[in-house]
Image: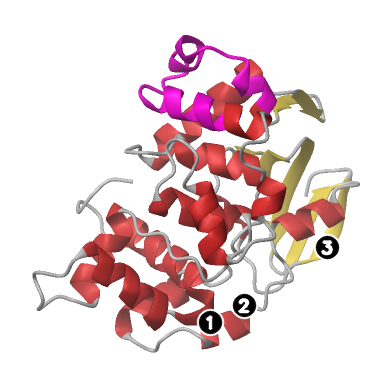
């Protein structure tokens, strides 16, 4: 264990799965643990069994961010008992849906369009290094995600230099709308799921999938069920294998009903399990 760390309980928790499952993209391995930022706070995390070691002073920040209060036994018990879901739940035991800062989450998933997980992480780190606040932990330099105001000041060309491509226009447009108050993320947090989704979809680059990612990972709406290429493949092959002509709206309606009040957890477990075990069947 690294020196200068505080210990907190972390039963039924898998740090590596939680940070590497494709819900958050900027954490990097550091020694025996992981180093990243929660908002503008540098945080180091290291796990040993049911114990989590956290950079001193960041205990409450880490516990909240990692959702150590989520009732995972209750969540797993709510899942449908079909073979695909059962296998995913066992594979992902201890994985938790983190509570990401809302703007960081919205922006990151805007930049994720048609990108694989390593590319999304690369973009996140580039944006942080160039435009985010500099942070430091134990002599290691890291960066916060740039604020909407900081990104709103940039030109599309400056953002394209971060390998954003067509996403640069969307990210800049979303940053400007939020910086100018046209969309208020604090207000979004007070709305019901449908209204919050509709408000997020006003932002450039935000369709239903990105909005559901934002709701799940940035607003703790654990029923939200984002459907990307991986999840659509899982649904079609595991739940509609003998039905070739299943529309996307039908898949969305099925997922919203079938996976229940913790559908977002079910989605992330199915997603991570598929990415890690369906070798050679796709990229992500």
The earlier-in-sequence mark between 2 and 3 is 3
Q: The residue tagged with tag 1: helix, strand or loop?
A: helix
In this rendering, would 202 be left or right of 43? left
Specify the segment rendered in magenta.
Answer: 149-175
Q: Which residue is mark 2?
A: 72
Distance (Cα) linking label 2 and label 3: 17 Å
124 inside magenta stretch: no
In this rendering, would 48 be left or right of 128? right
Q: What residue is rendered at 76% in x and 65% in y?
A: 51
Residue 192, image x, y percentages? 60, 66
Q: Which residue is mark 1?
A: 76
Q: Which residue is mark 3?
A: 8
The one of 172 and 100 positioned closer to us in this rendering: 172
* Residue 282 numbered mark, or none: none
Q: Which numbered mark, 1 or 3, is in the foreground of this view?
A: 1
Residue 161, image x, y percentages? 45, 12
Task: Tell me whether circle 2 and circle 1 mark residues in contact (CB < 8 Å).
Answer: yes
Q: What residue is rendered at 36% in x and 21% in y?
A: 165
How crowded pointer 1 is (Cα within 10 Å; few <14, some 14-19, many 20+) is rated as: some
């Amino acid at each position: 264990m690294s020196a200068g760390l505080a210990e907190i309980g972390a039963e039924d928790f898998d740090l590596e799965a939680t940070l590497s499952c494709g819900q958050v993209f900027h954490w990097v391995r550091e020694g025996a643990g992981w180093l990243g930022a929660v908002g503008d706070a540098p945080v180091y995390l290291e796990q040993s069994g049911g114990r989590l070691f956290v950079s001193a002073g960041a205990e409450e920040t880490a516990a909240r961010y990692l959702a150590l209060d989520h009732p995972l036994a209750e969540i797993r018990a709510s899942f449908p008992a079909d073979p695909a879901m059962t296998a995913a739940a066992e594979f992902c035991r201890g994985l938790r849906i983190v509570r990401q800062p809302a703007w960081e989450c919205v922006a990151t998933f805007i930049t994720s369009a048609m990108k694989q997980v390593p590319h999304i992480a690369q973009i996140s780190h580039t944006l942080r290094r160039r435009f985010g606040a500099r942070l430091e932990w134990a002599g290691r330099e890291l960066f916060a995600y740039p604020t909407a105001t900081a990104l709103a000041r940039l030109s599309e060309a400056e953002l394209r230099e971060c390998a954003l491509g067509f996403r640069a226009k969307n990210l800049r447009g979303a940053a400007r709308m939020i910086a100018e108050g046209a969309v208020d993320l604090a207000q979004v947090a007070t709305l019901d799921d449908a209204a919050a989704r509709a408000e997020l979809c006003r932002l450039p680059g935000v369709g239903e999938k990105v909005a559901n990612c934002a709701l799940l990972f940035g607003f703790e709406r654990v029923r939200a069920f984002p459907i990307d290429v991986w999840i659509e493949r899982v649904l079609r092959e595991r739940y509609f294998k003998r039905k070739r002509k299943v529309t996307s709206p039908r898949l969305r309606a099925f997922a919203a009903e079938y996976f229940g009040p913790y559908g977002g957890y079910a989605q992330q477990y199915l997603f991570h399990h598929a990415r890690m075990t369906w070798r050679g069947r796709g990229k992500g």
